[in-house]
Every structure is written in C-alpha cells, then in structure tokens.
Amino acid sequence: MKKIVSLCTAAVLCLSLLSACGGGKEEKKADLAAFAQAVQENHEFHSLERADPEDPELGAVMLGNWYPGLTDLDLEQVEIYMPMVSFSGGELALVEAKSAEDAAKVKEIFQARMDSKSTEGPGNYPEEVEMWQRSSKLADHGNYVLLVCHGDAEAIVGEFNALFQ
C-alpha cells in the first residue's frame, strides 16, 4: 500500500512540475476591428475613415504620411481611423505587432504622431493642437498599441485595457 501511495505522490509531483513548465500565462487575443467598431459606436466620432494599408492609392499613402515607418513593420492587425475631410473627427489607431520589438517601434511612431500634432506648426490649427494636448492618449498591452485623440480618451484607454483582463 505504501508503494502505491508513493507512486501516486510521485506522479502528482511530476505532473505539477510539467504544468509549471507550460510557458506561463498566454496573452489574450483581441479582435481590434471589433474593438474599433465598438469604440466608434459608443463614443461620438465624426467622419472617420479606415486607412487600409492594403489600399495603395489611399490607405498606404495616408499611413505613410501620418505614421511614417508603420507599414514597414511586421504587424498582425492594423486598424487606423482618420478624418478624411477635417480634423473634427478625432483619431483612433490600434495595432497588434508580431514581436515586442515591432510593438516598441509602433509606440515610437504613435508618440511621434502625438508630438507632431501637439505643437504649433505648419498644418496644425490652434484648436487641433489644443485637442491633441488635452485629449490624446497612448496605451499598450504586450504587442498591442493604442493611440486615441478624443474627448473620451481616458474611457477609451480603460476599455482597451479591459480587453486583456
């Protein structure tokens, strides 16, 4: 009887060791297209259009101008919504990179966008600069990165963070 109990105990210990080596907690996968749709339905954005990186005539050009270097990265998901006519619509950019290094580069690109829109200069209207200074936020979770410029930016960042809980 002692041998059976000892064998069972040893088996349980082996299984627990194997499960401990399982690689840790897996990151939750987020559907950025669905999240972007929900954000735009729950928060008032005006005249935003999706910049499709696969559209060489408009999407790729807009992304190249507004987010230089973004299309050079290896990205899993890209959901970027920009005002096509005027600034009044705000801005929403969501990316899932395939690596931590590319996610860090996306964060740098998004920060550069925030910096360029938050300062006086050619093409930046004073109201636009003020809105970017007051209402733009950058957030990340693992390989996911968010940039939002909207009056509800804090709430949107909270909703983004909730995707991973």
Image: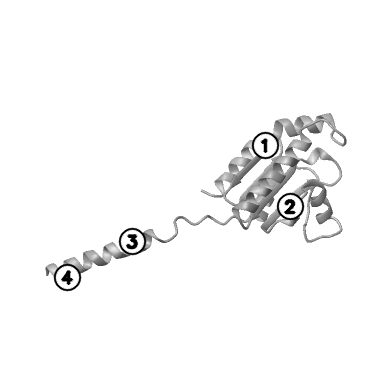
Amino acid carrying label 3: it is Leu
* Quadrant of the drawing holding the N terminus: bottom left
Q: Which of the two labelled residues, at mark 4 and mark 2, occupies the earlier sequence position?
A: 4
Number of the front mark, 1 or 2: 2
Q: Which of the two labelled residues, at mark 1 and mark 2, occupies the earlier sequence position?
A: 2
**Is residue 1 rendered to the left or right of residue 86?**
left
Q: Are marks 1 and 4 in contact (CB under 8 Å)?
A: no
Q: How did the renderer colour the structure? A: one colour
Residue 24 image position (x, y, % from top left): 44, 56
Distance of label 4 from label 3 (alpha carbons): 20 Å
- Seen at 52% across and 55% down, the residue is 27
Q: Nearer the viewer, residue 159 or 134?
A: 134
Q: Disc 2 on helix, strand or loop?
A: helix
Q: Which residue is mark 4?
A: 4
Q: Disc 1 on helix, strand or loop?
A: loop
Q: Nearer the viewer, residue 45 or 119?
A: 119
Distance of label 1 from label 4 (alpha carbons): 63 Å
Number of the front mark, 4 or 3: 3
Number of the front mark, 1 or 4: 4
Amino acid carrying label 2: it is Leu
Q: Which of the two labelled residues, at mark 4 and mark 3, occupies the earlier sequence position?
A: 4
Number of the front mark, 4 or 2: 2
- Label 4 crowding class (10 Å Cα cut-off): few <14, some 14-19, many 20+? few
Residue 44: in sight, yes or no? Answer: no
Q: Which of the two labelled residues, at mark 1 and mark 4, occupies the earlier sequence position?
A: 4
**Residue 17: image tag:** 3
- Seen at 67% across and 52% down, the residue is 95
- Label 3 crowding class (10 Å Cα cut-off): few <14, some 14-19, many 20+? few
Amino acid carrying label 1: it is Asp
Q: Which of the two labelled residues, at mark 3 and mark 2, occupies the earlier sequence position?
A: 3
Rendering quarter of residue 161: top right
